[in-house]
Amino acid sequence: MSGVAQTVRAFPVSVKGVLVRDGRVLLLKNEREEWELPGGKLELGEEPPVCVAREITEETGLPVTTGPILDAWQYHIREGRDVLIVTYGCHPESNQLPAISDEHKEIGFFTEAEVAGLSMPAGYKQSVRSWFARLSRLDDIEAQERRAAGRAVSGTWECCEPGPAGGRARLASREAAAAAGELP
């Protein structure tokens, strides 16, 4: 090791959640007049998914289930103040209205298109786009499964086999499948 002193910089970790309900994402306005995702500081020994659910409930009163991690990035707030941001997709557990905490000035739900024009860090906007894209893919898969299930109503179900979308049903007989138009 050289004789040159090295400065070690530690960053606080902030865990944020992207919560979409009825096609709109929940955002909070902070003291810097920026919109941000709900969430907060990761406490020592706390698991990040637990932290984001706790923080969202504390800041908005809304209970959530934490979903997949979306992104991690360093946010430079000002000289000497940087934070490691980790974002998760979150699912609402109820339809109750959010309440605003003392930590924020304003609360709102915004469409994906509206988010693009807000005063908001680019990393948050990317996380919002990412969660909307994932939710859209999930909606597409569920719609395909509903259509597939609807086409096979004339037969009896024999079993469920693993498939790319979590399972598919098979008609009990080849004749029933042909009658239902399921065979090529």
Image (tube, rainbow, N blue to C red):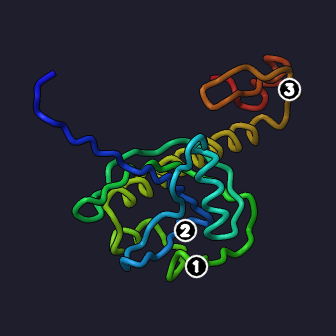
Q: Residue at x 75, y 63 (%)?
A: 94
Three-letter residue code for mark 2? Leu
**Residue lying at the far left of the rendered structure:** 3
The kind of residue on which mark 1 rests is: Asp
Q: Which of the two labelled residues, at mark 3 and mark 1, occupies the earlier sequence position?
A: 1
Residue 162 falls in image quadrant? top right
> From the viewer's perspective, is residue 35 above or below residue 53?
below
- The residue drawn where x is 85% and y is 35% is 154
The correct choice, above or below, for 75 with respect to 50 in the image is below
Q: In the orientation shown, which residue stands out farthest toward the front? A: 3
- Can you tell which mark lies on residue 102? 1
Location of mark 2 (residue): 26
> Which one is earlier in the sequence, the residue at label 3 or at label 2?
2
Seen in the picture, residue 4 relative to 84 is either above or below; the reply is above
Local SS, label 3: strand
Quadrant in which the N terminus appears: top left
Q: Residues within 10 Å of mark 3 (few under 14, many from 20)?
A: few
